[in-house]
Image: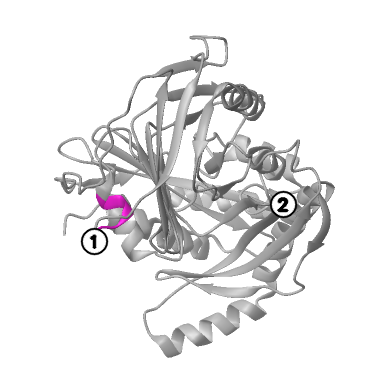
Amino acid sequence: MVSIDRAGGAPLPDRLVVTTVAVSLPPGLGLLDLVPDDHPVSWIRRGEGLVGWGVAALLRTDGPTRFADAAKWWSELTARAEITDTVAEPGTGLVGFGTFAFSDEPGDSALVVPEVVVGLRGDRAWMTTVSVDAARVDARLCAAPAPRPPAGIAFSDGSLDSERWMGVVADAVQRIGRGDLEKVVLARDLVATAAEPVDVRWPLQRLAEGYPMCWTFHVDGMFGATPEMLVRRERGLVTSRVLAGTIRRTGDDGRDLALAAALARSSKDLEEHEYAVRSVADSLEPHCSSMNVPESPFVLHLPNVMHLATDVAGVVHDAATVSSLQLAEALHPSAAVGGTPTLEAVHLIEEIEHLDRGRYAGPVGWMDDRGDGEWGIALRSGVVEGDSVRLFAGCGIVADSDPDSELAEAQAKFVPVRDSLGGS
C-alpha cells in the first residue's frame, strides 16, 4: 500500500496493475455480503453499485487545496497505471473512493484505491483487482464473515444539547430577518458509544435494506445513506439531485399524502428549495453546453421523511479536462448544505454552529480513471472511530423557521443512522 499526504510523504508507486473482468456473483448474496472487515468501502443503491476492500493506495489531504490535491494525485496515479478492462462500464478500471471535509479548516479528507472492487449494474457484474507493480491480489467472491452487531450502545448529546441548539436557530432567524443573509444550514451532532469497536458493515447492511432509494456509502470511517446526489458524470452527461424542504412522515399513508401536498405548497420550503436549485444550476452552467432545470420540484418519499427534490441535468463540454471530482468541488457547498449567499452562510456557520462538521455534508463517492463518477453529499451520516459513532443532522433555516420544528426535523434525520446501530 502506498500512502502520501499533502506535504509530500511517500512517493507514488511506479505503477499500479489494474485488472477488471466480468464475474458472476454467488447466488443469494448481495454486494455487502462479499465485503470483509478490511478497510471496506461501499456505494450502493437498490442493490447495485460498488463495494471494495483492502488499500492499494491512499491520499490524505486537508485545507483549501484538498480537492486540487486529490485531482492532481489521481491524475498522476492513473497516468502511471497499467489498466486492463474487459468490461468498460462506469466504475470499472481504476476506481478511487473519496470523502472530503466540509470546510477548508479544520477537517481532513481522503481518497483511497481499494485492492479489490466488485461492481454490479443491471445484469453485469465485475471485479477489479489492484496491485502495486507486479504483485498479485488473491480475491475470491464468497460470503465474508458476518459483522457483529454493536453491543451496549448508549446515546448522548454532542456539541450542543437541544435547548442550546434551538437558541442557535433563533439567533440565525433573527440575522436572516434583518437581512444579513437569506438562508443558512445548521447542523447538530449526537454521540453513540458502544461497549466494543463498531464493525461499520453492520449499520451499512441495515441502511441499504431500510433505505434502498438512498446511496449507502462508507469511505474511511464516514458512512451513511444519503438521498442527495451532488453530481454524477457519466459519458458526457451530468446530473445533480437537489433536496431542500423537509417534512417528517407519520406512518399513516393518508396523513402522509396530505403532508406531501402541504410540503409541495409550503412557501417556506419552496423558498428554501429554490435557493438550493439556483446554486447548483449556477455552478454547473459554466461546464455545460445545455441544461435542463425543472420549474417545479417533486416530493421524494423516504421511510422517515419527505423532501422537495429537483433533478438538474446537463451535457458537459469539458469532460476531457474536468473530472467528476472537479465538478463536485465546483458545486460544494451548495445552498442545500451551506446557505444563501454561500460565503455569508458559511461564515455564519463558523461563528454560531459550535460544531466541527468534519466530513459531514462534504462530497463522498467515487471516480474512475476516465473521470466519470458519482459524488453524493454526506448526509444521514456518521463517523465511526473504534467504539464511538458521531451522528450528524442538519436543517435549512430561513426567515420563518421555527426552532421547535427545526429540532423535530433534525431528530427525524438522525433516525436512519441511529436505528442502523440497533442490535436486532
Type of the residue with mark 2: Gly
Find out whether residue 29 is within the magenta segment. yes
Q: Which quadrant is home to the N terminus? A: top left
Query: Badge 1, how many Cα within 10 Å: few under 14, some, many 20+?
Result: few
Picture disc at residue 236: 2
Instruction: Provide the residue span drawn in magenta.
Output: 27-33
Q: Is residue 27 left or right of residue 289?
A: left
209 or 144: nearer the eye? 144
From this viewpoint, is residue 182 visible? no
The answer to whether any part of residue 177 appears in the image is yes
- Crowd class of label 2 (few under 14; some 14 to 19; many from 20; radius 10 Å): some
Residue tagged 1? 27
Residue 359 location in percent, x, y?
Answer: 50, 37
Q: Secondary structure at mark 2?
A: loop
Q: Residue at point 49% right, 51% down?
A: 379
Say what amino acid the circle numbered 1 marks.
Pro
Q: Is residue 23 magenta?
A: no
Query: What is the secondary structure assignment of the residue under circle 1?
Result: loop
Instruction: Name the quadrant containing residue 255.
Output: bottom left
The answer to whether 140 is drawn above or below residue 27 in the figure is above
Q: Is residue 398 above or below residue 366?
A: below
- Residue at 77 percent across and 56 percent down: it is 315
First in sequence: mark 2 vs mark 1: 1
Left or right of residue 323, residue 384 in this image: left
Give whichever of 252, 97 is nearer the camera.
97
Q: Is residue 282 left or right of residue 30?
A: right
